């Protein structure tokens, strides 16, 4: 899908209420004439679909397809999460609700630290994983993925980011959590940034 052949504005519904995610998407997919909107910005009700998938791709597809049909425009959704090796891949697709259906980031982080309280540093390896699904006007899909390897720290550090960022220490930035990175640096090494670069390449192809 070329991004250069059509000069009209392309409005894309982003299936998220997370403004941190939206900021990363807008920074990475800065095509001229493209505009990314949340449901609130579109001024339309957003009855979020139930994420019943067993994988990140399944959940991203559920959200993107629903947004495409609901808003009648191209749509983009991601499903991402943290996989901790010592916890057999948990919290995985349950990352945003690890401590309960309406858990805050702080509650999820506290539960993760509790689950890892007896796990030594060498065994706290983990990765962020992201799958994005873009649905164009005609309903065709583009799927892009990205990962970021690292480990889980022993206490939250940093004021930026969201989710598990204050606990996640990327291998690419030793000694600094994801929450201590500037947006450009986070996009350069992060899972969502990798998925967005793959999606951008596909859209430009």
Image (cartoon, rainbow, N blue to C red):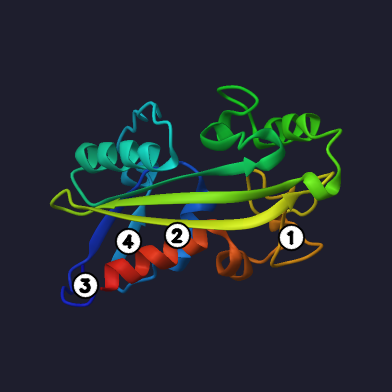
Total label count? 4
Task: Report which residue position mark 2 lands on.
Answer: 195
Task: Report which residue position mark 3 lands on.
Answer: 2
Q: Position of residue 88 (x, y in %)?
A: 64, 35
- Occupied quadrant, residue 201: bottom left
Dot 1 falls on a residue whose secondary structure is helix
- In space, the residues marked 1 and 3 are separated at their CA atoms by 35 Å
Q: Work out whether 172 lies above or below 67.
A: below
Task: Tell which circle, 4 or 3, labels the residue nearer the N-terminal end.
Answer: 3
Q: Position of residue 49 (x, y in %)?
A: 35, 29
Task: Tell which circle, 1 or 4, labels the residue nearer the N-terminal end.
Answer: 4
Callout 1–callout 2 Cβ contact below 8 Å = no
Which label was assigned to residue 180?
1
Q: Nearer the viewer, mark 4 or mark 3?
A: 3
Q: Is residue 23 left or right of residue 151?
A: left
Callout 4–callout 3 Cβ contact below 8 Å = no
Can you see residue 129? yes
Task: Report which residue position mark 4 lands on.
Answer: 35
The residue closer to the viewer here, 129 or 62, is 129
Crowdedness near tag 2: few (<14), some (14–19) or many (≥20) residues, C-alpha within 10 Å? many
Task: Tell which circle, 1 or 3, labels the residue nearer the N-terminal end.
Answer: 3
- In space, the residues marked 1 and 4 are separated at their CA atoms by 28 Å
The residue closer to the viewer here, 75 or 119, is 119
Callout 2–callout 3 Cβ contact below 8 Å = no
- Occupied quadrant, residue 184: bottom right
Residue at 23% across, 43% down: 68
Dot 2 falls on a residue whose secondary structure is helix
């Amino acid at each position: 899908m070329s991004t250069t052949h059509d000069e009209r504005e392309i409005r894309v519904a982003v299936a998220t209420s997370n403004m941190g995610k939206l900021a990363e998407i807008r920074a990475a997919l800065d095509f001229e004439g493209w505009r990314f909107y949340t449901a609130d910005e579109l001024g339309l009700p957003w009855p979020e679909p139930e994420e019943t998938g067993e994988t990140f791709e399944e959940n991203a597809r559920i959200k993107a397809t629903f947004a495409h049909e609901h808003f009648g425009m191209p749509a983009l959704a991601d499903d991402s999460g943290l996989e901790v090796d010592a916890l057999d891949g948990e919290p995985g697709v349950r990352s945003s609700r690890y401590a309960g259906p309406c858990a805050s980031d702080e509650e999820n982080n506290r539960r993760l630290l509790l689950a890892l309280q007896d796990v030594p540093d060498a065994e706290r390896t983990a990765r962020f994983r992201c799958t994005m699904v873009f649905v164009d006007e005609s309903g065709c899909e583009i799927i892009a993925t990205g990962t970021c390897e690292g480990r889980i720290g022993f206490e939250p550090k940093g004021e930026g980011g969201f989710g598990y960022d204050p606990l996640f220490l990327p291998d690419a930035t030793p000694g600094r959590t994801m929450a201590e990175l500037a947006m450009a640096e986070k996009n350069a090494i992060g899972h969502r940034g990798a998925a967005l670069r793959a999606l951008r390449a596909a859209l430009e192809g």
